[in-house]
Amino acid sequence: MAWRESEVMKVAVKGDNTAFAREIKELCGQDVLTCYQCRKCTMGCPMTFKMKMKVNELMRAIQLGLKEEVLSADTMWWCVSCETCSTRCPQGIEIVDVMDVLREMAYKGDYYIPVESMESFHKVFLRSVKAYGRLYEMGFALDLNLMLKDPLKDADLGPVMLTKGKLKLLPDRVKDLKSVKKIFENVKKLEELGA
Amino acid sequence: MKYAYYPGCSLESSAKEYDLSFRACCQFTGVELIEIPDWICCGASSAHATSHLLSIALPAKALVQTEAMGLHQVIAPCIACLTRLKVAGMEMSKDENLKKDVETVLESSYQGNVKVRNVLDVFLNDVGLDKIKQTVVTPLRGLKVACYYGCLLTRPPHIAQFDDVENPHSMDDLIQAVGAETVDWSFKTDCCGVSMSLAETDVALHMTNKVLEGAKDAGADCVAVACPLCQSNLDLRQKAIGNKFGTFYNLPILYFSQLMGLAFGATTRDVGLDKVIVDPSPVLGAI
């Protein structure tokens, strides 16, 4: 297949371009440098159809040290952590662990997150866990709709689930909420120390 | 057979019928469950997409609590919870520094003696197919079931350590043991897209449609699942899928434990059959 000039990404590699891959290995133990582009990850990925940068392309970009391009990529935000790529990788790379590290790096580095809805999803989910110790499903869905500026989204499902006894109107709160808050606080403290 | 029980958030509301039917099956087969008192959420994918330490600390709490109950095994029916609990246990056993950090976060120590078990594994290997066959009073004769395993029951293999990773059969074995027929199909371990279901619904519909289409093409009367997230995604979205893709599958999505419970002689109410959205009574009518 011939590539048009406009489709080719030109990369100038300066100095040691493996630093980024080594940083990732340090954080999650996965050595992306062993990837030889067989593309089993991309072929098996159920989300390939949404990704602008495919999984194998992301692996290659990491090898080339393209940190900015990787951390602003959409790949890890479409990833549903189904583990198909990790299972099939002939080099045994736990690709989902790499995705997790990239998401964490993108959050902490304040990168633009191209799939905004998924960023909201994670934020609202953890807010519920922090507040009640458990996921308050109905509150979570309503909160998420507000964040997505689509308050009536799935409004038809609410009544169906309520009549089937599948939604609780009020949250289930754990008794020892203090220790839940403590977990979140302690994680933050330790992570700040580490950084 | 005594186990700590970690129901998880879904089993308390949207998957209440999983909790009911699983507890019923345990009673029939002599599995004793002791619910972990005041358990907390495992953090699911939102914790591991945000902070590694948080994603280990939240589920590790259940492991610490299991130890405090004097038990060595914990059952998590929700496959998402199951995986988080397993990952937490495994990563702490491999990484002493991580274990120390988690103990600091939880302000309690963990000996590392808890085994995390999935429900299918317990019924197959602890209860055993013989005992299950003996417990059946109403065999589900003539019912054709597509067993759907989803992502995390078998993946990634070093965490799940269960069944064949690409073509699992453990649920098929259980469903056959209670007298039903299971169909061969290609979508047993394909992702249903549930994590996109609320935030990117169209994407989820596209994926769910493929799974439902596969089950229907294989001639299934219903789909059996073992995960509350798969169940709600496949069951709740069938109307939207019909509107979008033009096919109304009308395929009941049942927990494997609902089918087993019925075969063991539980009433439809005992197994929460009234809570399923796509009405299963036409396909279960004869039974």
Image (cartoon, coloured by chain):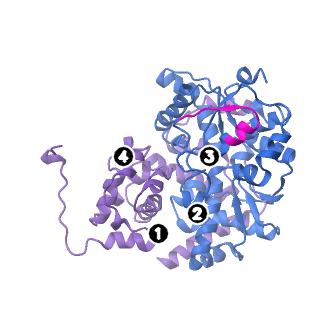
Chain colours: A purple, B blue
Are discs 3 and 4 located on one and the same chain? yes
Q: Which residues are magenta?
A: B173-185
Query: Chain letter of disc 4?
Result: A
* Mark 2 element type: helix
Place residue A137 in its image quadrant. top right
Q: Residue at x 49, y 32 (%)?
A: B210
Give the amino acid type for the residue marked by disc 1 in the picture. Answer: Cys
In this rendering, position of residue B217 left or right of residue B121: left
For disc 3, the neighbor class at 10 Å (few under 14, some 14 to 19, many from 20) is many
Q: Are marks 4 and 1 in contact (CB under 8 Å)?
A: no
User: Is residue A168 something that shows in the picture?
Assistant: no
| Marker disc for residue A140 | 3
Please, which residue is most extreme toward the front here?
B130
Quarter placement of the N terminus of chain A = top left
| Marker disc for residue A51 | 4
In this rendering, position of residue A8 left or right of residue B53: left
Is B235 rendered above or below residue A13? above
- Residue for badge 1: A28
| Marker disc for residue A53 | none
Q: Earlier in the sequence, mark 4 or mark 1?
A: 1
